[in-house]
Image (tube, rainbow, N blue to C red):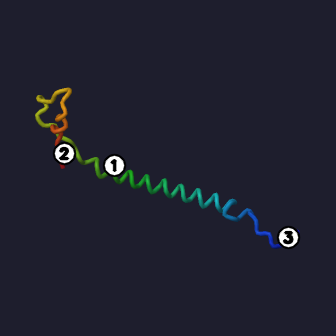
Amino acid sequence: MDNNFKGSGVFSLDGITGMLIATVLLLSILAGLTVWGLGVQNANQTKFYKITDEKSIKMIDPTSGTHRVLVN
């Protein structure tokens, strides 16, 4: 038997330790993206559009987007 064998054990990076590192990494990425998404939603929830001159808007008109004005 070779006593110098340093193969994959239970606590090597391809064992339980590697699985725990990958799980913690994925959960921290998920938490970071969730916090970032909530911050973006909170920043944009107070910005509203006001429609000006709604009687002149046509159904098919390439300039119909000019009637929307961002109100701060």
Instruction: Give yes or no for contact between labels 1 and 3 (Cβ–Cβ under 8 Å).
Output: no
In the rendered structure, the answer to whether residue 47 lies left or right of residue 28 reads left
Q: Which amino acid does label 3 sit on?
A: Asp
x and y percentages locating residue 67 in the rendered image: 15, 37
Residue 6 has which mark? none
Element marked by disc 1: helix
Residue 70 has which mark? 2
Disc 1 crowd rating (10 Å Cα; few below 14, some 14-19, many 20+) is few
Residue 2 has which mark? 3
User: Mark 1 highlights which residue?
Assistant: 41
In the rendered structure, the answer to whether residue 2 lies left or right of residue 31 reads right
x and y percentages locating residue 18 in the rendered image: 64, 61
- Name the outermost residue toward the right: 1
x and y percentages locating residue 20 in the rendered image: 62, 59
Disc 2 crowd rating (10 Å Cα; few below 14, some 14-19, many 20+) is few
Q: What residue type is labelled 1?
A: Gln
Quarter assignment of residue 39: bottom left
Q: Nearer the viewer, mark 1 or mark 2?
A: 2
Q: Which amino acid does label 2 sit on?
A: Leu
